Structure formats: C-alpha cells, structure tokens
Image (cartoon, rainbow, N blue to C red):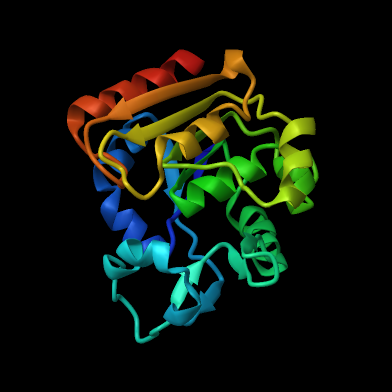
C-alpha cells in the first residue's frame, strides 16, 4: 500500500505554495517511500477579516492566484473573539481523504498544524470516515502547531488525548506560534507517544539536511 501523507498548509498559504516551501522535507520523505499530498483550504476570507496579530503572516503570504482573499482552514468567530473549524473544512477533508487516501500520517504547519493536531484526537470520528476508508493514522507531525483555545474544543482534547506517535517542532526564533502554544498541543498527547524537537530558525518548516535527518530518524524508529 502506498504510504500517503496529508500535508496541511498554514494561514494564507495554498497547497502549491506549501509544497514549494517543503521541497527538502518532501525529498527526504519520498526517499522513505512516502507520497505527500497538499490540499488547499476551501475557505477564503477578505484580509480585513483576519486578526491584526496575524499581519506578519499575511504580509509574507504568497500571491500565486488572481484572488485577493486569504485562504484558511479556520474561521474567526466575532461573537466570542475566537475561532472555529467550519463545516466546509470538515466536508472538504472528508472528501479529500476518500479521493486521495488512505493516509499513513498527517503533517501540518502553523494553522494547518493546529487543525492536524485537533483531527488527530479522533481522525475518523471528526471527519466521518469508516475504518475501511481510513485505517488508523500512524503518526502526526506538527510544525509550529497549537491546541485550539476556544472552550468548545477542550472536552475533545481532554477525553481523546492524541495517542498516535507525534512529533512537535518549534522554532527558537518563532514569534508567531509561541512556545506555550506548541507546548499546549504537545501536552494534549500521551507522554509515551509524543516528542518535542527544536530548530534554530523561525516560523517555517526547516529544510536543512541536518534537521531533516533527525525527522527521518524519528520516523524510522516508529517502524
């Protein structure tokens, strides 16, 4: 069976852009026999609807389409000054898994890592997939990931701690996803299944050969 990996991009990125930014990572994964799939978030919002604190990410966003909107997996909730994962995201990923899966693992960056971590609490249940459509995931990798903060999601994390092997990667110079946020997702996993790894850069998926070697070693240890 092909070892497919679901790759979830960050806010304001696209699947195509994320693929270009993870070329080194993809090369190393392909050497291990994995095929990486890069879906693009189905939700598009006006830049004005994106909170100011994400401005640094938006400013660095790709301009690879005719659209002036911002692509996102999550949607802001003005009523609570928070956010939520809309049904459009759930429906899209449900169909994507059926059409392109099943998947061995899920990898996310920033907002995509937050979504990946949340889904990893109960991937099939949250996406409405049967065991035949999607066998249990084998691993999660979260680069600059975080635990959803709105209150309505806390019970899901608390009752369904992430038990699949998970790797949480934090950049020492990352000013977008602070260490406490990465730690929040890390603490949402069972202790024996989770690994925390640091890199010397900022808010990105590292492509240096030395760091990628650590990631592939982690993957190989799972086997």
Toward which corner of the image does residue 48 lie, by quadrant? bottom left
Q: x, y percentage for residue 168?
A: 45, 31
Which residue sits at x=28%, y=69%? 59
Residue at x-position 66% and y-position 61%: 84
Give percent across and percent down for residue 202.
26, 43
Choose between 12 and 92: the one closer to the eye: 12
| Residue 149 point in image, percent of width and height | 62, 48
* Rendered image quadrant of residue 132: top right
* Residue 25 visible in rendering: yes
Residue 13 visible in the snapshot: no
Image: 66 above or below 41: below
**Left or right: where 21 falls relative to 120:** left
For image coordinates 41% across by 19% down, the residue present is 218
Most distant residue in the left direction: 209
Q: Residue at x 69, y 37 (%)?
A: 121
The residue closer to the viewer here, 142 or 83, is 83
Is residue 158 shown left or right of residue 199?
right
Quarter of the figure that contains the N terminus = top right
């Amino acid at each position: 069976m092909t070892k497919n990996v679901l790759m979830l991009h960050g806010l304001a990125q696209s699947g195509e852009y994320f693929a270009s930014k993870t070329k080194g990572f993809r090369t190393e994964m392909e050497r291990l026999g994995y095929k990486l799939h890069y879906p693009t978030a189905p939700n598009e919002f006006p830049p004005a609807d994106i909170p100011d604190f994400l401005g640094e990410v938006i400013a660095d966003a790709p301009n690879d389409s005719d659209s002036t909107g911002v692509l996102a997996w999550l949607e802001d909730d003005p009523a609570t000054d928070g956010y939520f994962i809309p049904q459009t995201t759930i429906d899209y990923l449900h169909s994507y898994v059926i059409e392109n899966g099943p998947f061995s693992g899920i990898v996310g960056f920033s907002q995509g890592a937050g979504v990946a971590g949340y889904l990893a609490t109960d991937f099939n249940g949250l996406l409405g997939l049967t065991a035949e459509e999607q066998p249990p995931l084998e691993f999660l990798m979260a680069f600059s990931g975080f635990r959803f903060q709105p209150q309505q999601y806390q019970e899901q994390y608390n009752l369904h701690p992430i038990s699949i092997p998970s790797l949480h990667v934090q950049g020492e110079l990352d000013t977008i996803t602070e260490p406490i946020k990465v730690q929040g997702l890390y603490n949402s996993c069972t202790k024996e299944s989770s690994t925390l790894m640091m890199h010397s850069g900022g808010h990105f998926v590292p492509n240096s050969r030395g760091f990628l070697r650590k990631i592939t070693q982690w993957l190989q240890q799972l086997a």
